[in-house]
Amino acid sequence: MIARQLISETITPLRSSETGAGALELMDEMRVSHLPIVEDEELIGLISDTDILTYNNLQKALQAILFPSPMRMSWRTSTFTMSSGLLMP
């Protein structure tokens, strides 16, 4: 299903390349606390003003909030990568 079928025409979707500051400005103008994020007509996420403010870097693209770099963990001699809540060797 493409995003156009899911999102009301009165709500302007964001793109992941937009900054947190731009997203907050649009949320303020529209008087909403959440906006959808769309790429190539596909819904990739929903972001809130709290998500943006918690990240605490308004100049970074929303992509950095949605898809942070994987966390690396070391345990004795093995290294594991944590991604999407899964632990992978």
Image: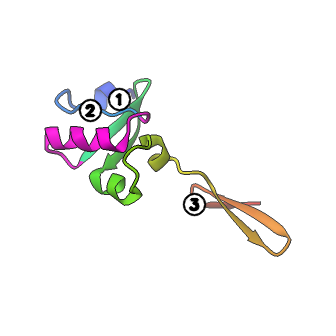
Residue pictured at 26% horizontal, 47% vertical: 34
Q: Residues within 10 Å of mark 1 (few under 14, many from 20)?
A: some
Instruction: List the residue tagged with mark 2.
Output: 7
Which residues lie in the magenta part?
Answer: 16-33
* Three-letter code for the amino acid on which mark 1 is drawn: Ala
Residue pictured at 38% horizontal, 35% vertical: 18
Task: Check disc 2 and report its element: helix, strand or loop.
Answer: loop
Classify residue 18 as left or right of residue 77. Answer: left
Task: Check disc 1 and report its element: helix, strand or loop.
Answer: helix
Quadrant in which the N terminus is drawn: top left
Q: Is residue 46 magenta?
A: no
Task: Say which of 31 and 55 sits in front.
Answer: 55
Task: Check disc 3 and report its element: helix, strand or loop.
Answer: loop
Instruction: List the residue tagged with mark 3.
Output: 85
Instruction: List the residue tagged with mark 1.
Output: 3
Label 2 close to label 1 by CB (< 8 Å): yes
Q: CA distance from mark 2 to mark 1?
A: 6 Å
